[in-house]
Amino acid sequence: MSGAFLPWQQALAQRWLSQQDAMPHALLVHGLSGIGKRQFALSMAQALLCENRAANSAEFACGACDACHWVESGNHPDLMRVRPAALAAREGLALSTVGGEGEPETAGAAKKKLSEDLRVDQIRALEPWYHRATHRGRLRVVVLYPAETMNTVTANALLKALEEPPPETVFFLVTDALDRLLPTVLSRCQKLTVPLPDHVHSLAWLEQASLDQADQWLAAAGGAPLRALEMSQQQSQPCPAWAVDLMEQVVQPNTTAVGKLADELAKQPAVEWLRVLQRLSLDVSMVRAGLAVRYYPRLSRALRERAAQGSLAHWSGLASWIGQQIPLATHPLNAKLFAHSCLQRFCDRPL
């Protein structure tokens, strides 16, 4: 873990760090997915624990003291990262009951499917830690993410700590989806909005990372630079080849081969191709409304032709319908039939 704030986060971080004495016990860090909210929360945690930084200064973590070294190695005794076991594994960090700071993964945990949700036992395991004195006589910090993966039981367990906060403890809850959190959790946290970075900052950051077609990747990610970089590591082009072919076909009469494409998509994670279909639908909607293409500017011609085939209400309704299918992506459905159904809906010509 690095204590470095991303360029577009620095002013926001300075503002909050300069008022440390007035900092609430629980901050709900929220904003668009892929803009660096998790890194912001972890960097804030390192700054608060840094031993060379004066309280209420706008300075960031020094990166050189013992506390900073412990944070960066994942071993600071006054920092707990609480996240789903599956996410901890993808981050390449050891698993523990609490969420993964420095304890070895057990053989049993490696064999069973790891949870994608925050579990109530992870929250309960924090209680003994709350009641111990801090190791360095400073703050203790909890960084919990993604907060929207808590079910009602898990959220209620956390509420006990939020309602009667342990002394010298700061919670950072990170989420992409405020609407998926319990109202009781929302009411006990102060919201900290991480804004979408402007296009110039995002593009400069991606170009510094030596990303080819940075502008196209950034567009495909909806302006979220970290998401753009992640996408570039997972696929070869900003818009998948199958989506380019699909858009070329749908603007021609009676040429869309839904069955063959459904076979191809059935082999891929459904949530990934559903998001591409949703972005295509949103782009068609935006063109129909007289706005600029947001996600796939290189498909502008096909998007304009498609937009002319139906009303704005039809295309915006299609984008909404596809969005409603995304939660079904993890259900044990027949993958081919699911792909065929969604593709057919996308390809149908409006009456």
Image (spheres, rainbow, N blue to C red):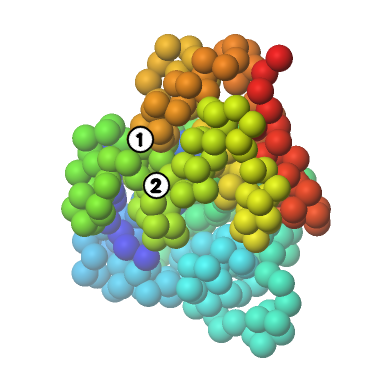
Residue 324, horizontal then vertical, whole percent: 70, 34
Residue extending furthest bottom?
107
Instruction: Give the residue at mark 2.
Output: 238
Kind of residue at badge 1: Arg
Residue 165, horizontal then vertical, whole percent: 59, 48
Secondary structure at badge 2 equals loop
Q: Would you say 43 lies left or right of 97 here?
A: left
Q: Quadrant of residue 65?
A: bottom left
Q: Earlier in the sequence, mark 2 or mark 1?
A: 2
The dot on residue 29 is: none
Q: CA distance from mark 2 to mark 1?
A: 10 Å
Q: Would you say 99 lies left or right of 287 here?
A: right
Q: Residue at x 68, y 28 (%)?
A: 348
Residue 323 seen in render = no
Instruction: Give the residue at mark 1.
Output: 298
Q: Residue at x 47, y 57 (%)?
A: 141
Query: Is label 2 or label 1 in front?
Result: 1
Kind of residue at badge 2: Pro
Looking at the image, do the residues carrying marks 2 and 1 touch, with CB atoms under 8 Å apart? Answer: yes
127 or 332, nearer to the observer: 332
